[in-house]
Each structure stands twice: as C-alpha cells, then as structure tokens.
Amino acid sequence: MENNSLSRESKLEDKEYKWGFTTDVDTEVVPKGLNEDVVKLISQKKNEPEWLLDWRLKAYKHWLKQDEKEGEPEWAMVDYPKIDYQDIHYYAAPNKSDAPKSLDEVDPEMLEAFEKLGIPLEERAQLAGVAVDAVFDSVSVATTYEKQLKELGIIFCSFSDAVQNHPELVEKYLGSVVPYSDNYFANLNSAVFSDGSFIYIPEGVKCPIELMTYFRINTADTGQFERTLIIADKNSYVSYLEGCTAPIRKSSQLHAAVVELVALDGAEIKYSTLQNWYPGNKDGEGGVYNFVTKRGKCGNKSKISWTQVETGSAITWKYPSVILQGDDSIGEFYSVALTNNHQQADTGTKMIHIGKNTKSTIVAKGISAGKGNNTYRGQVKILPSAENSQNFTQCDSLLIGDQCGAITVPYIEVKNPTAKLEHEASTSKVSDEQLFYLMQRGLDEEEAHHMIITGWSKEVFKELPFEFAVEAGQLLKVSLEGAVG
Amino acid sequence: MDKILEIKNLKASVSETEEKILDGLNLTINKGETHAIMGPNGGGKSTLVNVIAGKDSYTVDSGKIGYFNEDLIEMEVDERAKKGIFMAFQYPSEIPGVRPWQFIKASVDAKRKFLGDKELSVREFSKLYDENIKIVGMNEDLMKRSLNEGFSGGEKKRNEVFQMLMLEPQLALLDETDSGLDVDALKSVGDVVNRMRNGDRSFLIVTHYQRLLDHIKPDFVHVLIKGKIVESGGYELVKKIEENGYESFV
C-alpha cells in the first residue's frame, strides 16, 4: 500500500508542467527598464509611422502619471509581490533580419519548440484547416493559408505587418475600444506593445476557416505585451482561436496584453482562448502574471462571443467585455477558470448595454483545487438608453479539497426599468458518491475527477470549436494533476 | 470448485459513526454460481456489497476477503473493478455533462487496458453498445442525456444492468436492483442476468423480494440478519421466507 502511493506521487511530480522547456534561439533584447527612450526604440525597431509613436508616448506618459499617483489597481482578489517595472525587458525579437516566407525558412529549433507544444504547424494547419499565425516571443515567424484568405480580402497578419501594410485600418481602430488611458496595464501595453495579431474581414465575408494564433513567452524575464486587433466589417463573420503555453521560468513573468474587437453592423466575432501559461510550482514560486484587457464593441445587430478556458498563470486578471452599443446586439461570455496549488484568478466579464434590445449571456465556471483562489467578478450595466435589454448570468463554482476558495462578485447596475436580468449562482463539491460510482467502473481517482469536472464544464466547452474542446479537456486534466489522490 | 470470493469472519462498520454492521460474516462464492442475499432492513445486505466493492465510507475492522486468492481489502476500488468486480448500484449517481456513451467507453477502455487487451475501436464499441441497449430495452433518447440525469428510478436500474452487460464482470453484485421496478423492467433485469450466467461468471444478488429471484432461480440463498448469515440453502429458502418472514430465523 505505502509503496503504491509513493510511486504514484513521484509519477505525478514528473508530470508537473509538461511544457517546461526553453529554446536557444538568438534573441535581440533591449536592456531592462522603461523610459521614453525605450518606447522610442521599440517604435523605431518596428519602423513605425509617426502617429503610432506619438500614441505610444501619450500612453507612456499616462501610465507614468498613473504609476506615480496610484500605481497598480488593487481591487482584485489577487496577492503578489510588487512588480519592478524597471527590471523587465520590454522588447525581444528572434535574431533574424528577414522574416521567413515559408516554413522551410523557419528556424528548425523554433519548429521543434512548436512540436513540443503539440502543434506541428504544417500538419495542424492542413489537417484542421486552420491558418496559424504563430507569435514566437512577440514576432510572427510563420503564416499559412495567407493566400486563400487574401483572395477573400481577409487580412490575417501580425500586428507589425498591419502597421506597415494597412496603416489606415490600424490608425482608425487602434484604441477605439480600449483607449490608451483605459487602465494601468492597458496603458503600459499601449506604450510598449511588441506584436500580436491583426485581422480584418471585409464587408459580407464569412471567414471559411478558424483563425488561430499560438502565443508563447520564451525569453527569461521578458514581459510580453501583445496587441491584437480584430475588425469584422458589416455582416461579416470570423472565429478566432488563441492558445497559450509558456516554459518554466524561475522568476515571475509579466504579461499584459490588450485585445480589441470591433464588430460593425451585422457582424459576428467569436473569440476563443485556451490559456495555459506556467502557473508556478507547488509552493507558489514563479509563474506568469497575466493582466489582460480584452474588450469588444458591437454595432447594430452584431454579436461578440468570448469563450475562455483559463488553466495557467500564477495570477489571472482578466475581464473580456462587450460594449453593446448598437441596437439588437448580442454579447456572450463563457468561461472556465481553474486554479490549483497557489494559483489565483480574478476573472469575469463586463456587459455594457447601451443599445436597445441588447442581450447578454454570461456563463462563468470556476474550479478551485489545492490552495487555489478563484474569484468571479462580473459587471452588468444597463444604461438608460438600453430599452428592453436582457442579461442572463450563471456563476458556478466547484471546489476540490478543503483548502481552496471561490468567490463571486457580481456588480449589477440597471438604469432602465424595461430591462430583464437573471442571475444564478451555485457552489458544489465533487461528491464521494460520484467518485465511488466512477471508480467502481474502473476509472482511477484522477480519471474520475477529470470526467466529473469536464462534464461540469461542458456548457462552456461546447462553445469551443471541436478540436479546441478536446484540448481544453486535456488542459484541465494536466492542470489538475496532483490535486487529487 | 474454483473459488472466486471467500469472505471469512468479516466485521465491518460505518467509518463516520463507527456503528458496527457486519459481525463475523462468512461466505464463499465459486465460479458460475448465483447467490442471493435476503434479509430485513439494517441487517447489512447493502453494506456487504459496498464493502466488497471497496466503498471507503465503510471500514473493515477484521476478517478477510479473498478474491481469486488475492487480498481484496487492500485493493483500490478501481483495481477491484478492473479485475472484474461490478456493482449495480441501488442509487446510481448523476454525473452532469457526461454522456452514458462516453462514460461506458472510458470504463471499458480502462478495463481492457488493465487486462492488456486491445482498446475497442469506436465502431466495435458502438456496435456492442447498440446491441446491448436493445437487449436491456433502454430508451435510446435517454442515453443522449447526461448520465442518470433525469432518469426515473427504473431507468437508472436498467442503465446499471446495461453497464453490467457492457463490462462483462467476473463477479456481479446487484444491490437491490429490483426495488422500484415494474413487472416488465423486472423481467428484463432477470433476463439479462440469466443470459449472462455461465460456468465462469458469478452473481451476488441482494434483494427484499421473491419476484426477481423467481426469474433468476439462484443456486444459493442466504439470510443475512444483524450482520451474520444465519441460514443458507437453495431456492426453496425463498419460499420459506416469503411464507414465514425473517422472524423464524432469529
């Protein structure tokens, strides 16, 4: 008996963080620290137009002022040591002057890193019909399916490329949903953002494939500041998938991204995320600090849907939101957030109803295990103009073990009497009866937990594209290893 | 005769309250035999099958349970299952979001993997699944829901018997599978058991009623009162109980 349980434990430790590896690719790194010159240097390296540099500098000045006055926001239920913003590299790029035009030109070591992540680009792209714009330490290294998309007039490229090739679109929409002065982390991002994805879907075009980007933090102590902008023109449709893993690092890594979605009249954007960055070790050392601002704006009769499965990072601070500006627009948020060991997540959404007949749906599920803390924080705001608006909110928490916690913090503000709001909340534990039942059918304790948890998360998983849903299940499994038994 | 299960002087209690339930129980089941356990409420019938299956809300205080000459008490619940012990639950759990198909596929896979057999392909599995659904008379639409969610009591029991068919156990424990069943369902449970009986497989059937046993005609009947088997016999013992109640055994 004792021997058994020993060997089982060591097996679990072996499996700790499956994706802990680093790649030796020469990176061009700007020295640590943040000042006006660093902002200028980043802009210069990226050969940006004057207006963008000005924008960055405005953001930097705003951030600086805010940093002096109040510093980081403190309202979230997360606890972490103070971040020294002068002790971070703000730019790192693979040391290649010419961007590769095909996979053959991509550094083999990078490709190998992708292999380890389980995303053989070429196969995956072809088999799954997915175009992959791979962001590797802030700079895109490979783009497939570009041609096919081009014929439809779809632009899917790195943010930097968009700045060079489609400056008019970038200038028009950058900051239109998340202004450079929005919040502490968004302001920082606006000043120093490195790269990210850019998508434009022309009027009336339904993007025929799921667009996908894998982000990965790879250089030690490099804060990664992605900037993603998706514009769906009138009556268009796009589904975008974002998946993330990061290698093990000793000190914590800051990640402050901004994602802006613009859905013009009649357009629909579906944005799915799997976030699996390094959560830190069992004792709570290391791990990624993930402070992300994601927001979308709807025109008339348009729809924005966020689906996220958050299993990684030491700290998750993230509230994908929808501004329902247009009449008859729809906002959705489906989320599974898992915290294990010492992970902390404060996540949720904001649904801001401005237009008439606007509808929003929130299904937020939090799973807490180990010493993990999970907070749902969600705001539903119905403005006076939002005649006949509706919101449905469902918050469920699942606890595994007795040292974890779950908190639900809803903020509801209704300024129009015709609004209809529903709020449901539940907290449950995996019951011994359920476990015994599944184990009596031959599933071991971990498999049994996994099945119960995956089933419990199904309402969210079913919103994910199929191949992503399978991966999401795997992620939960890997993330819960060691939490049970 | 090949022994499958050998229980010697088993004493067991409820873990939480330490209430003693089984008090020196002895029982031997050989290959191919069907045993029925009858007895009044609180006598320990359900405790017995749960202890054999390994439920940790019961504690084995002393005694031995041998399964193919292995010490069963030291075995994890899932290992017992993979080695062929199946329990049809009196109150099967509901598992939201998990479809019966997915659950049973995972169970069959786990068992086959453990035994070193090749995993069934989705096609092979589906064929078996569909056949067995028909044999048990399960409502197919029901099987598209979450496991046991919104199933009536009778449907849950049928689902248990269906799983038993799929998993082909060596030793099947039926914990009051007949309670709450209508006449048709009762007959189909009996039919499945009879269909599965062979020279190799054994059954331990816990029941309050004669009805199911009339279908099955067990080889042995035991009366369990106050944690002990007080009388064992053949099928004729069922009649005696039905006529005189349990009082004559006390």
Image (spheres, coloured by chain):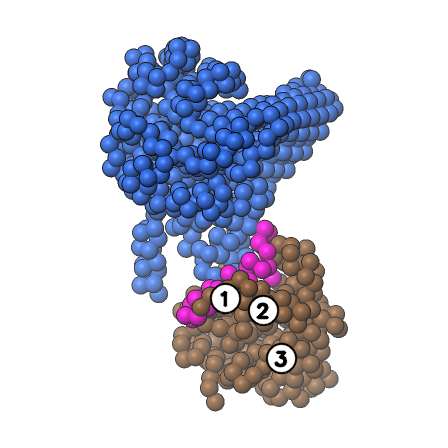
User: Label 3 marks which chain's residue?
Assistant: B
Camera-side residue: A61 or A175?
Answer: A175
Crowding near pointer 3: few (<14 within 10 Å), some, many (20+)? few
Residue A22 percent coordinates (x, y) = 28, 39
Residue A292 percent coordinates (x, y) = 45, 27
Q: Quadrant of residue A247?
A: top left
Q: Residue at x 57, y 44 (%)?
A: A462
Identify the mark nearer the N-term, 3 or 1: 1
Residue holding disc 2: B128
Q: Which residues are magenta?
A: B92-117
Residue A445 percent coordinates (x, y) = 45, 58
Crowding near pointer 2: few (<14 within 10 Å), some, many (20+)? some
Residue holding disc 3: B195
Identify the mark nearer the N-term, 1 or 2: 1
Camera-side residue: B122 or A157?
Answer: A157
Q: CA–CA distance between discs 1 and 2?
A: 10 Å
Q: Residue at x 31, y 59 (%)?
A: A7
Viewer-nearest of labels 3 and 2?
Answer: 2
